[in-house]
Amino acid sequence: MTIEENVLLAPYTTLKIGGPARYFAKVATEDELVEAVRFARGLGLPLFVLGGGSNLVVADRGFDGLVVQIAITGKVFAGSASGSTMRILFQVPAGIDWDTFVAIACEAGYAGVECLAGIPGTVGGSPVQNIGAYGQEVSQTIHTVRVFDLEAHDFVDLSAKECEFGYRRSIFNTSQRGRFVVTRVVFEFDLDTLVRLNYEDLKRHFGDKPNPRPLEVYRAVREIRAGKGMLIDPETAGPDERSAGSFFKNPVVSTRVVTDILETLAPDEGTMPQWPTDDGKVKLAAAWLIEHSGFKKGYAQGRVGISSRHTLALINRTGDATCDELLRLRDLIVLTVEQRFGVTLAMEPVMLG
Ligand code: EPU
């Protein structure tokens, strides 16, 4: 393993924004990870773990520490779960591309991750923010997450329960942030599970067709995502794809807030999308709130802007935008939505530096 100095991070992110890391190491095995951790400890430097860089905003001044890129790949190992002929476990190294794994599971005929097709990033990143789309969350199929515990300096297998998954959250991005490095994820599938479509965009796509096969859903989801500029191919990314996906979380508010908002809407503003949550609150569509605060798709502010295909994706229009410019646009959007609707949007991607 080589440790490089002063490595620009922008190329490692889908936004193509961000300054240099003081040190940068690409680790291909668990042993190399331990070696990299020792190096950072020896110098008393902070460590940051990079996966696919698809949910990451790096500051212009960069990061004064060691960035470790998890490139642990290898075979995806499938075997039946102990004591059951109906359940199968897939053991997947953290550095495998997420969509590649989804395709493997779907091609083998297993339902459970098909709606998460086309999400950029790596398998190791998937539990961190509990990636989700079209009514599915990765936590529903996670069996265990193998991590390196930076406090105990040892490898541990955490059960799905121990990961405390919620909407775009887990212990990895909340209570234990920075403590664990994911090196492998084990997924569990049930042979009996059929595809269930919960989401309007997808139901429309399949019309009356009952129980489409996982691979059919995989293809449909990729098509829908592509139409929204949310299928990011780093090689061919155009301006609309130079993004970190959804830049804001969908806010969860009380029914009182919803009533207040509905009272302020003009008749020509249409119906505000809203979904009840299990705990009696309401999830709103951040994209809708942003649009109805005056920001249209394709909105431009210098070198940054809003995707012309999805209001929730902030983009690096020209490819050479700075993080400061992006954060200024973020602040303007947050402030404007707050003034218009009294709802404070929270940023979804991770901020480094
Ligand atoms: N909408 C607009 N303008 C737009 C797009 C959407 O007003 O440009 C409104 C529409 O009313 C639509 C609603 O927002 O009904 C929801 O839009 P969409 O179905 O595109 O999903 P989203 O809520 O914006 C979430 C996830 C996405 C995930 C999609 C599909 C979050 C923050 N985002 O987006 O995840 O792919 O649902 O399930 O939860 C990501 O996290 O990076 C991400 C892309």
Image (cartoon, helix red, strand yellow):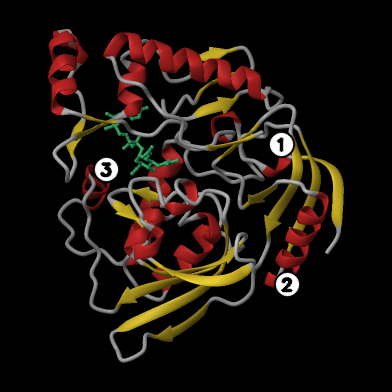
Q: Which amino acid does label 1 sit on?
A: Ala
Question: Considering depth in this image, is 306 or 188 the residue closer to the camera?
Answer: 188
What residue lies at 47% left-to-right and 40% top-to-bottom?
230
Category of crowding for the residue at label 3, using alpha-carbon neighbours closer than 10 angstroms: few (below 14), some (14–19), many (at least 20): few
Mark 3 sits on what residue?
201
Q: Is mark 2 on a helix, strand or loop?
A: helix
Q: Do the residues labelled 1 and 2 touch (CB within 8 Å)?
A: no
For residue 249, side relative to residue 64 (left or right): left
Q: In this view, does 99 lie above or below 322?
A: below
Q: Residue 10 carries which label?
A: 1
Q: What residue type is labelled 2?
A: Asp
Category of crowding for the residue at label 2, using alpha-carbon neighbours closer than 10 angstroms: few (below 14), some (14–19), many (at least 20): few
* CA gap, disc 2 and disc 3: 44 Å
Q: Where is residue 191 in the image (x, y as percent from the top left)?
A: 28, 79
What residue lies at 73% left-to-right and 39% top-to-bottom?
9
Q: What residue type is labelled 3?
A: Asp
Q: Is residue 316 above or below residue 120?
A: above
Q: Which mark is residue 31?
A: 2
Q: Which of marks 3 and 1 is nearer the N terminus?
A: 1
What residue lies at 34% left-to-right and 74% top-to-bottom?
189
What residue lies at 75% left-to-right and 58% top-to-bottom?
26
Is disc 1's CB within 8 Å of ligand 1? no
Q: In which quarter of the image is the N terminus?
A: bottom right
Question: Considering depth in this image, is 216 or 74 the residue closer to the camera?
Answer: 74
Q: Earlier in the sequence, mark 2 or mark 3?
A: 2
